[in-house]
Image: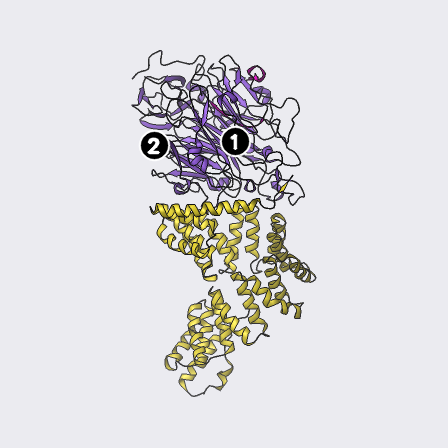
Amino acid sequence: MKLSRREVLAMAGVGMTAGAGMLRGAEGAPLFEEVPASVSGITWTHDNAMSKEHYLPEALGPGVAFLDYDNDGWMDIYLVNSGACDFYQPGKGTRNALYKNNRDGTFTDVTEKAGVGGGTFGMGVAVGDFDNDGWPDIFVTSYGKCILYKNNRDGTFTDVTKKAGLETPGWTTSAVWFDYDNDGRLDLFLCSFVDYGSSAHLSCGDNKLGKRYYCIPRFFKPTASYLYHNNGDGTFTEVGRHTDIARSLGKGLGVVATDINNDGRMDLFVANDTVQNFLYANRGMVGGKWQFEEIALAAEVAFGEQGQPRSGMGVDAADVFGTGYQDLFVANVDQEMFSLYRNQKDETFRDAAQANGIARSTRLLSGWGLKFFDYDNDGAVDLILANGHPDDMIENYSPAVRYREPLLLFHNDGGKLRDVSEAGGPAFGRNWPARGLAVGDFDNDGRLDVLVGNNGGAPLLLRNRAGAGNHWVGLKLEGVRCNRDAVGARIRWSAGGVVRSRMKTGGGSYLSSHDPREVLGLGSAGKVDWVEIVWPGGGKAQRVEGLVVDRYVTVRQAV
Amino acid sequence: MTSLLIYVALAGLLAQTDPTEETLKQAIGLHQRGDVEGAIQGYKNYLAVRPNSPLARSNLGAALARTGRYQEAVEQYQIALELQPGNAGVELNLGLAWYKAGETQRAAEAFGKIHEKAPDQLQPTLLLADCWLAMGRDKDVIRLLTPLGEQRPDDLAVAYLLGTALARDGQIVPGQIIIDRILRKGDTAEARLLIGTTKLRAQEYPAALVDLAKAVEMNPKLPEVYTYYGQALLRTGDAPHATEAFRKALEANPNDFGSNMQLAILLKEEGKVEEALRCLRRALQVRPGDPGARYQMATVLLRDGKADEARADLEQIVKESPEFTEAHVTLATVYYRLKRKADGDKERSIVQKLTAAAQAKQQQGINIK
């Protein structure tokens, strides 16, 4: 089909300045440049609540998000902070922050007006349109109490956590909105970390320096994560207890929703800290109940190659090798190396980290936020990793390991990842206590920018200057029968004689939420022949032709 | 250690006129002058005529050992001992040949027999202790050398071997006494090595690295110095230099168990499967049946796509070591790859039970703030 004028909604102001000429950066210029707070106006900093007692929640935040909360076509930013809890009473001003994009490279703090300051000891953020009204809602995970902020469509939000039935106890970390039963509504998977006790907290005593230190999560009891079904009336029901999700006790930190076996149902890959990872294969309705089968060990993504559990933190999924199947990634702590799991098309995976230079580059690093994305719009997914050691005293025990660590950038060279961090720019030459990472195009130039949440510091905003000469098409998918955000959609596109494909996964990274739009890299091709979308729930592919390159368009599901 | 012995004492008694005996005399002469290949040929010519000569057999063994042909040397020594049972010199040479061939267990058996017969002989006792250290029998070394250490407080070799065993066995205080004894002799490589290994044991990795780096600097030829230096480097996050250290350790002693194991793991991580397997085979020569080495071998085979080969060994390992969780994990993986789901599920269930038990154990002894 061809897009009608009504179907192609050129977003106001979008792409007006995004001609191909803009993509040509100076030769040898860094791929990413830091946008300082003095320019962006983002003056918020993370309060990690660091104490001499070293309570573990201090070390894990923060998450960050790109979202268009006011639907003006420009990515805004949400930042999660710590807050009051049983071991910490912050001073005035410690809160989450929502920054509105001023469309000129600057942002304005609108938190108070929007009413999304939090107030709990926040961890992460997952953005999704749970009520399919076309306005993104915000879910905040916490040590203590989660918050669901419903978007009021007027620049404000309402805390509907209690009404929604999402008052989840304990310590939650990453969350993902996805439609597991393809009923057209976003459900919620919520990673639960460890049982950190109630009023008293476990301590591992003093380290060799005679100081309290961040206890290794191995010492804490594992917990079960949560799966909430969206009832369609603003409420949710916890349904994990009927499945392997409740039976699998883990220490969840990262989650990505994807379809590992191309059966049209979204599966879940969960990174656990110090216990095995989980891979929940969505088996659909079995015996009158929806079933998830935990298959990580059989799939060879549960343990490291030495048969030992690792410290899984950040995750993501993408078709890295162009096989039509989703590959998986998990970041771990230093000495464990990260894993790039290549899909064998039979619900098993093989670790390809060594062959792709991942193992060598990550041996000394501890990885959190990460994302497969096509930073240079050549059509192949690349990879960015945000790192930082959880132990602030690590340098006293391991001279080669740093508390602050560098970002890593890998370029996909025809199905093989190559470390190109040195070309990344000055920010890649510095070290950061990085945690969350989100990818989004805040200046609408078609080049995906990066936002990194730093523990106890200011966030890092990186403007993408890569991909000079390459073209792109940006899609905002709008589900009608399926979930409005179209999480789980499959996209194919043809440009320059090359057909590529991508899946719109849910979640991924660590504690963070990405720009919901899909930017399709076209390489040097000046036009896109066609784009096909298979919406979640299956059915015939919807073909779109006549798209103008270097523009964002909204594509609505044909009904 | 001792050099291989050549028996020449009887040469003068050989008949001067017997051409066959003249052949032996010439072979011994060549051997003494360093023409080892000529000597080997001479001994073989002689043995072709007089195969039951223990002297020629023993000397041939010594010549073969000198050229690194330890297995052939062992055969000659064994024949010599059949012809002349109880020859102490040949027994020692046999043990040394096993030792050099990497057959540490057999070497230990040979030195053990000599030690039983002559417990006062220092050399075979120290060689036995060295073999036991290589085999991980630290408590046996402590039992063997503690009386000797009291009798010979100034003997650095005894102190070094005993101190190493004590450090490895976690006996920090008696180990420290030995270290102090060595330190009284000055800042030596041996002392630094012992201090470094003690700190390694105590998980004080950066401090251990300093001492072990100094030990390497002072005497890079000190046995096992590169092994422990490599371990300290690895523990402090420097895998590339650790790999170099393990390689140097193996250049000095190809039978170093620890270096073979550590290097194999690093090589496997780099995808160098064949080289990793070579290291593991060598490690298993030193410690036959070692479950850790066999487990690593199985993981390398699995990585190389040889699931069925890995299966047999893993099944045996978990039978012998039922609480070896990692082996159960890998065995489950093997079964799943071999499409034996029921067996895989059974192993998975064992993994879950062992993990839960380990988790419960971890939580014991944690304080409440």
The residue drawn where x is 40% and y is 39% is A295
- Residue B306 seen in render: no
Q: Which quadrant: the N terminus of chain A?
A: top left
Q: Is residue B298 left or right of residue A61?
A: left
Q: Which quadrant: the C terminus of chain A?
A: top left
Identify the image quadrant of residue B188.
bottom right
**Circle on res. B201:** none
Identify the image quadrant of residue A372.
top left
Foreground residue among A380 and A76: A76
Say which amino acid is labelled 2.
Asn
The picture places residue A76, in percent across and down from the top left corner, at 51, 19
Magenta part of the protein: which range?
A102-127
Foreground residue among B105 and B313: B313
* The residue positioned farthest toward the front in the image shown: A288
The residue at which mark 1 appears reads as A173
Q: Earlier in the sequence, mark 2 or mark 1?
A: 1
Q: Which chain is yellow?
A: B
The residue at which mark 2 appears reads as A262
Q: What secondary structure is found at the residue carrying circle 1?
A: strand
The picture places residue A476, in percent across and down from the top left corner, at 41, 19
- Chain letter of the residue beneath label 1 in the structure image: A
The residue drawn where x is 45% and y is 77% is B81
- Chain letter of the residue beneath label 2 in the structure image: A
Colour of chain A in the rendered structure image: purple
| Few, some or many residues within 10 Å of mark 2 (<14, 14–19, 20+) | some
Q: CA distance from mark 2 to mark 1?
A: 28 Å
